Image (cartoon, coloured by chain):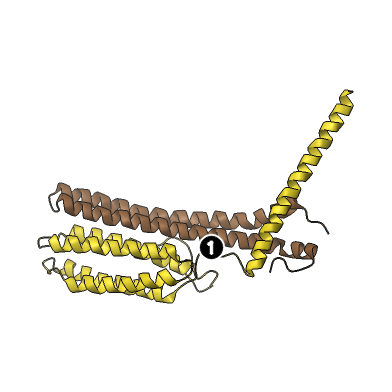
Chain colours: A yellow, B brown
Amino acid sequence: MAPERRHTIKAESSNIAIKRRQQVVLGWLMIWLAAVSLSGCAVKFIGDYDAAIDTGVSDVQQRAEVYFGKLKVDPATPYDPNFYNDIGARLTVLKTRAHILPQYPIIEQQLQELQGQFDRLQTLDKGMTRPFPIGAITAAESAITISVESILRLELALKRGDKNAPSLGATK
Amino acid sequence: MSLDAGALGSKMLAAALPILKKNAVDAESFASVEFKKIAQTMVSIEEMLAAGQINQQQAQLLLDMQKSASRSVLLTLKGLALLTAEEAINAALDIVKGVVNAAVKFPLIP
């Protein structure tokens, strides 16, 4: 076979392969679009903003800050089991709410982490001889604050496109 | 009118890419601030342990609290990534909506 003819055949088969690939891509694109269309609305991978979780988590933080404040002012403040019972009950209510909300497993898991932090703080607080070292209070407070900030940041981001919602920029 | 997969793909990528880039920068800045705080606290736990202000069990409890905070930060990043993917896909669909709906002659993309 002449070299020009061989070259032409090669170019034609290459064009056919490209066209076939484009058809496959277009086919998948149409299937995907059809799936999106059948859902009848925009694509959504995670739930919507929930005001009860937002305010509930802020309330837990406020109560924790009052407790930390007392310990900082007077490191001899005795261990208070009522504080932990109250926080535990509030977090249980929030976890139940997160569990039933659609597409909320991430925030439910974060609430579980926050509960775990208070459980550890309780063990620490119960066993700590007074005065409670200020550095230990600050370390526990910092961990809880980061967890609360993380939940609130995600919760606020779930407002999606709300012009009044805080931006996704860095905190502090 | 037939659809051109290459042109559609390019338009969709052009709509999605700026969203992916912007949100990646925001997520990085959030993670950087939070992980710095966690790292500083870990240093202070080590210092308290060395100074005998807390014992090993207490240091472990405080460290576990920091590890939990790290997991919470990562979970937020996971959630933000899902929101970013969502926003990028919706922007990509929106940009080709007119062309696709005109080609198929019904509102395939609502």
Question: In the rendered structure, which amino acid carries the disc numbered 1?
Answer: Phe
Q: Position of residue A23 (x, y in %)?
A: 76, 49
- On the picture, is A144 further left or further right than A28? left
Please give the chain letter of the residue carrying mark 1.
A
Visible in this render: residue B11?
Answer: no
Residue drawn at x 31%, y 51% as measured from the top left: B39
Q: Position of residue B66 (x, y in %)?
A: 29, 55
Quarter of the image with the N terminus of chain A in it: top right
Q: Is residue B52 above or below residue A36?
A: above
| Residue denoted by label 1 | A45
User: For the image shown, how many numbered marks are present on the structure?
Assistant: 1
Q: Which structural element holds mark 1?
A: loop
Pick the front one: A44 or B33: A44
Quarter of the image with the C terminus of chain A in it: bottom left
Determine the image quadrant of residue A10. top right
Residue drawn at x 77%, y 45% as measured from the top left: A20
Residue drawn at x 84%, y 36% as measured from the top left: A12
